[in-house]
Amino acid sequence: MVLVPPSGTAKNGRMVSLNDVYRARRRLSDHLEPTPLPSYPALDAIAGTEVFVKHENLQPIGAFKVRGGINLLATMDSADRNAGIVGYSTGNHAQSLAYAARRFGVECVIVVPADPNPVKAAAVRALGAHLVEYGPHLETAAEHAAGLARSRGMRLVSAADEPALIAGVATAYLEVFTELPDVDVVLVPVGSGTGAAGACVVAEALNPDCRVVGVQSDASPAAHDSWRAGELVTRPNLTVCDGLATGAGFGLPQRMLRGRLADFRLVSDAEIAHAQWLLLSRARTVAEGAGAAATAALSVMKSQLAGQRVVVMCTGGNAAEAELRRCVDQER
Ligand SMILES: *Cc1c(COP(=O)(O)O)cnc(C)c1O
């Protein structure tokens, strides 16, 4: 097991500052519009408090990760851009890199675990990236991607240990705190932790009273358990929500979450599927499992959230057909 060094002593990547996030916002302003943050009375009634949904599922690739991909490509030098990039992902990170690579005219190879979410795989191919299916899970895909990057001289992009990705995704929270300066709680789904790390940086600077709470599937609790343990741990990775499917903690986001995240909660895949259905039926919006995890935490945390203004991050909408069928069937 690897010890997570204390904040400020980053070893394999520097921490991200609020200034990095402001610079990212300037870069992204040429490419993306702010996403909406509405409330839905029918959802408030169920949560028993005032809930606002940050609609990152309405981004061009259907997920918040597009912010990170564009910021990363925008900050790469021309030698790196000419060499191309290699990424590994269960889907949305891949789409983000492929989308940004196409915008910047950069060659892009993506390694995904075998049998990927077909919606995401088709989208990556449609964006012109080379998709390589390899191995049973993200960790084997990552090793294969590292080998490809070495042999082809391309820039390997980590799924999480990349300051430019974190600064990019953190811009979502500039939008949240600008539009709702008095929000009390922000619920953020966690896979690797880049989104939650970005939320913490922005909240600490702009609204230190706001509690940022991470939410992960109890079937893939590596980030949660790493945060609780204060060291990077490996855990079973069995969630059906591909955006949350990581089997090990990532160093950079974990260092940034340490001492900053107010709480970290686990929810079951069945609770997540119910939240997907709630978003479909009460907010008329399509969330993939990972995109509904924060909404699932509303019922788990109901007593603590009463009387609070709560933002749930609806991080993505790339639900495969089978996933939508499952969430509707479960309600019968
Ligand atoms: C990647 C992803 C997450 C998890 O984000 P991390 O930054 O890896 O913690 C949550 N929701 C969706 C839709 C995602 O694609």
Image: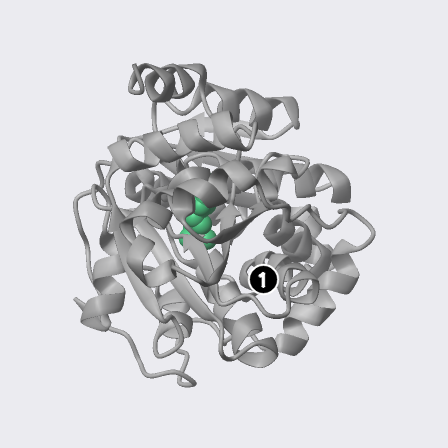
- Label 1 residue SS: helix
Give the percent coordinates (x, y) of residue 19.
67, 77
Q: Residue at x 64, y 22 (%)?
A: 126
Residue 155 against residue 269 in the figure, above or below: below
Does 80 sit left or right of 250 as displayed?
A: right
Asked if one can make out residue 194 in the rendered structure from this viewpoint, the answer is no
Give the percent coordinates (x, y) of residue 242.
37, 35
In the foreground, 158 or 219: 219
Does 79 sit left or right of 97 as displayed?
A: right
The quadrant in which residue 259 appears is bottom left
- The amino acid on which the numbered mark 1 sits, given as a three-letter code, is Ala
In the foreground, 150 or 90: 90
Figure quadrant of the N terminus: bottom left
Figure quadrant of the C terminus: top left
Q: Residue at x 55, y 33 (%)?
A: 283
Asked if one can make out residue 261 in the rendered structure from this viewpoint, the answer is yes
The quadrant in which residue 324 appears is top left
Residue 71 against residue 147 in the figure, above or below: below
Question: Mark 1 sits on what residue?
Answer: 170
Q: How many neighbours does mark 1 have within 10 angstroms: few (below 14), some (14-19), or many (20 or more)?
A: many
